[in-house]
Amino acid sequence: MDDVTGQLIANNQTTLNLAIALLLGAIIGLERGWDARSQASGERIAGIRTFALIGLLGGVAALLAQEVTEWAFPVLLISVVAIALVAFSERLSHIRNFSITGTIGMVLTFCYGAIAVAVDPAIATGAAVITALILDNKKEIHGLVEKLQEHELDAALKLLVISVVMLPLLPDQDLGPGGVLNPREIWWMVVLIASVSFVGYFAIRLAGTSKGILFTSLFAGLSSSTALTLHYARQSTISPEVSPQFASGILIACGTMFPRILIYCALINPALLPQLAWPVAVMTLLLYLPALIIWQRNRGRLEVSRPELTQNPLDLKSALVFGVLLVAILLLGEFLQEWLGDLGIYVLAASSGIADVDAITLSLTRMSQDTLAGQTAVIGIVIAAATNNLVKAGIAGAIGRRELGVRVAGPMMVSLLAGLTVAWLQ
């Protein structure tokens, strides 16, 4: 009785999987039929019925390969490919359209039907839905490609090189004094910085500046708040009447740097997050609130050009320089901690924060996993971030109008003192 029950369950599952294979073909066929809906019946190579049957055929092929002969699947697959090529060739003689997307879609539909029966229906369903989305968004995808600039494509490819190609090749072991140097972890931090900058850059690039100064500033904080500060400082001398809005934008960009620090911490050492969250939240709030108050008091519907981020954050040379900087800070941190204790870490944080906050943040977060106390790491990160923001306040005052520097420097100082106080009291 148990054997009979098991056989019935297996048969029901097979029937269900074949039905899924049929439906997956129908999903892709629905998109193909909709795309060619203006053509008369018989002029389309394949529509919803054909694709549904191709999906079912893929499921049948997998079932026959399991139960009858392993040659069933390759023979039927080759047959589908041959039929698709014949149909494509015949259609090409009447319509000069060299796109093979439909042909590839037919082959994929056959394979999804086989996967639904022989492997996992969930995998097949997900792949089929994604395929239908890709086919349906032809204009949007082509539009993105047309808008993509050469240096942006180059940046994307370089991001892939430093992540999926180089990262797995590096050894995952602790080296150097105190074991603070792990090649794979260091390079992973480089990839992390590059990825965050990449996302920030394209958020501005795709959305444009029609959203206004605040929107641009929010995402510039992910890519380069320093570049935005320079840009708005220069703009304030050209358009003095917009100086309050520029000050608000700079504060927003500098405030966005703090949530970015929390992301780094969550990915590298989540145990440090509870200690770091409060001072970072206070510093962020004390920059965002003044920014919004200044904006409300000087409200205006104004648009500005996007900051010119001329430095490519995904450039391999920049990535290597950043990696070297990380190594230097890790080694210096280990040395200064042994020599001066916590004071050495704070001096290193302040000096590093003048030029860059990411390297010291990642370094201290990494060190807090092994040799550095959590509170020391938190205070060091706060010092570095505050120092970096004070430098940007100086840039705003030196390059931009005097009132721009005043509006920016006040909240920066309050944010610095409050952040240090909260970090110290924890």
Image (tube, rainbow, N blue to C red):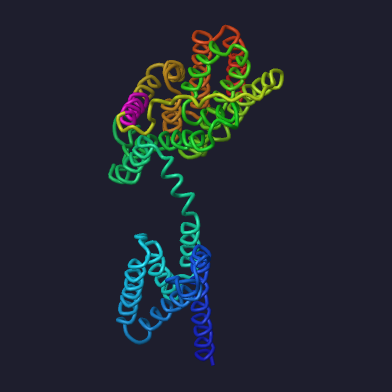
Side (left or right) of 89 relative to 401: left
In this view, which residue lies farthest toward the front? Answer: 94
Magenta: main secondary structure equals helix
In this view, which residue lies farthest toward the right? Answer: 297
Residue 206 within the segment the image draws in magenta: no
Position of residue 233 measured from the top left corner of the image (x, y, whole percent): 52, 14
Side (left or right) of 378 relative to 88: right
Side (left or right) of 85 relative to 210: left
Q: Which sits in the foreground, 121 or 174? A: 121
Q: Which sits in the foreground, 327 or 388? A: 388
* Residue drawn at the location 46% of the way across and 28% of the way down: 361
Residue 418 higher or lower than 155, as above or below: above
Position of residue 403 measured from the top left corner of the image (x, y, whole percent): 60, 8
Residue 322 within the segment the image draws in magenta: yes
| Quarter of the image where the N terminus is located | bottom right
Q: Which sits in the foreground, 405 or 338? A: 405
In this view, which residue lies farthest toward the bottom? Answer: 1
Residue 138 higher or lower than 218, as above or below: below
* Residue drawn at the location 48% of the way across and 71% of the way down: 47
Position of residue 135 measured from the top left corner of the image (x, y, whole percent): 46, 59
Side (left or right) of 129 relative to 84: right
Q: Which sits in the foreground, 130 or 376? A: 130
Position of residue 234 measured from the top left corner of the image (x, y, whole percent): 50, 14
Write the start and end of the magenta stretch as one range: 318-331
Count of numbered tags: 0
Residue 284 higher or lower than 80, as above or below: above
- In the picture, residue 249 is in which quadrant? top right
